[in-house]
Image (cartoon, rainbow, N blue to C red):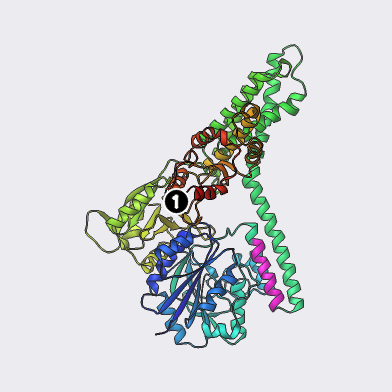
Amino acid sequence: MGTDISIIIVNYNVKYFLEQCLHSVEKASRNIPAEVFVVDNDSVDGSCAMVKEKFPDVQLIENDQNLGFSKANNQAIRLATGRYILMLNPDTVMEEDTLEKCLHYMDNHPDIGGLGVKMIDGKGNFLPESKRSLPTPGIAFCKIFGLSRLFPRSKIFAKYHLGYLDEDKIHDVEILPGAFMIIRKTAFDRVGLLDEDFFMYGEDIDISYRLTRNGFRNVYYPETRIIHYKGESTKKGSMNYVLTFYHAMIIFARKHFSRKMAKSYIFLINMAIYFRAILALSRRFIKGVAIPALEAAIFYLGFYFIKPIWESYKFPDSGGYPREYMLYVVPIYILIWIISLYFSGGYDRPFKLRSVFRGIFTGTLIILVIYALLPESLRYSRALLLMGASWALVTGILLRILFHLSGIPGFELITKKKKRIVIVGSIKEAERVESVLKGTEERTEIAGYVSPLPDSSMKYLGHSQQLEEIIKINRINEIIFCSSDISSHDIITNMMKLSDVRVSYKIAPAESLSIIGSSSIHTSGDLYMIDFSSINKISNRRNKRLFDIISSFLLLLLYPLLLPVVRDRMNGLINILRVLTGSCSWVGYYPVSNRQDRNLPGVKKSIFTPADGLENIEIPEDAIERLNIMYAKNYRILTDAGILIAGLRHLGQKINNQHVKKRKERI
């Protein structure tokens, strides 16, 4: 029997999403002669090792560089033997009968060249890009400048996503979604493979257009559904995405539109790029600079009013502080407080009031230490400094409370309230998922388990058909579905049924240490992982960098005293400067020969590793991996300090990409 369908998944650093996708592909292809290709574009998150271990029947193509979407798909298409080719994103989950329904429909309609399905996001909401029209200049204008959003059902303004067509009915469409696109092999033979001029984005528009130009129909087929965790490989709001996407549109326009039409289209695209760039820069300013700048202004304003009041008390007759005090001294105070707030997490979202206290307190201590070292002539009022610090602390806290009360998304205060979760699955699997959650740093409270089927057991809150009542009665914030116990069809049905309920969803693949979901169509997928939560924390990454800076300054000052101890003195000085400038860190992972063996969070190359001090011992590679895992999972600044102090005499050793070679020579 020949192969009915060849499924091609291009992967780039989304290991856990790929794992879940492959599980759903396995279920959907059980009754169909199928072959599965995974083309990996040089991922460094352990994706290839996971595929080899868990999905040995998958044909894995490992690229040593990121070739982009079109080239990677073409690699597998040339090897495919199926009558149909499915190009599938790794951040998708399909229903068990998706492939059977799609192939049956296409077999009965031989004039169809390509087919797409109904897509929903991680909250059960319909994704409008499931059906699209050709982005001509007029249609693109309405999309870029928001007219399609203002008039979502208009036949004039909403053509981009064909908002006037019923999402639950079959329609002929011009453009198929690249996340799930089934194309006849014979259609590929006629129109050619994907255009490799498109690195990412635009190739789906190009191949869809070529299909219709060659007499084939493209069909939107909503009789089956998939979940698409949008944007997991790229962040949709980033300028990099904007530039890549619009560059693809320019390639398409030059290829398929008349010269005059292409020229107007390119002009429109350039306008859109500038428009989006302004929005992105404004958003980045508000997010990264506006609050510290506003806070600095408020701090300065406090000194502006406090200073004359204090001067009237301190100098009742006449006199006061010199003009330089407000020009130079106060701005230096404020700069130290702002930097201290940053490193204390005062600007992390959601806001933490204790981080504000810690930041102002630490900054004030630093100022007082500097104050004590200054000559008498440069020591201004400590009382005024402490009053200014009190003003900074109170206004810093009040500012964050005001932001919280404003209700602006992303400007909330952190709360100690735990996320209430129910797990839908068998008792055994639900208990396993609960243990995964306990291994993360998420603040969660398991309200109970829900049976996938009606069950009278006292261990369950109820069954999946009662989810809406369970959510309301138990004040549930999140539902986790165990994919080994409940079908993708039922998961998707429940998500769509409850899409109006304020609750989020995640899926726990069988035997996986990951729990995957997405909070909205505008965000990349959320991910709970049992591993490595510590070193991935923003505060720990920031503190690690702060430790590198402070320790490097100290070592630089003390280096003359360390010269008799350090073996390679010149390289030791170079290493201090490397760490100080941020090109490397003092402590990082010990590299293993297969860099894809584990999904370790990225850290900079380093001078020392957790294995330093064991240089005369032959260490097996799996033991090295465990050391790295423990370092990532249990990261503390004291760990880095201890490793650095213990290795002072080796301060001049080469960075750790040489460690693998050294260990191999010893063994």
Residue 515 falls inside the magenta stretch = no
Q: Which residue is drawn at the image coordinates 51% and 33% (left, top)? A: 646
- Viewer-nearest residue: 227 or 584: 584
Q: Which residue is drawn at the image coordinates 74% and 79% (left, top)? A: 258
Q: Residue furthest top?
A: 317
Q: In the displayed structure, would residue 606 be above or below residue 87?
A: above
Q: Which residue is drawn at the image coordinates 75% and 11% (left, top)? A: 317
User: How far across and down, in percent of the image, does residue 41 sit?
Assistant: 55, 64
User: How far across and down, in percent of the image, does residue 174 sit?
Assistant: 58, 79
- Viewer-nearest residue: 176 or 272: 176
**Magenta stretch: helix, strand or loop mostly:** helix
Residue type indicated by callout 1: Glu
Count residues near mark 1 (Cα–Cα under 10 Å), then give few for <14, some for 14-19, many for 20+. Answer: some
Which residue is the site of mark 1?
621
Q: Can the viewer see residue 402 in this picture?
A: no
- Viewer-nearest residue: 585 or 6: 585
Q: In the displayed structure, would residue 51 be above or below residue 254?
A: above
Q: In the displayed structure, would residue 655 be above or below residue 505?
A: above
- What is the span of residues highlighted in magenta in the rendered image? 242-256
Residue 244 falls inside the magenta stretch = yes
Q: How many marks?
A: 1
Q: Quadrant of residue 153?
A: bottom right
Q: Can the viewer see residue 516 in this picture?
A: yes
Q: Quadrant of residue 103?
A: bottom left
User: How far across and down, in percent of the image, does residue 11 sit?
Assistant: 52, 65
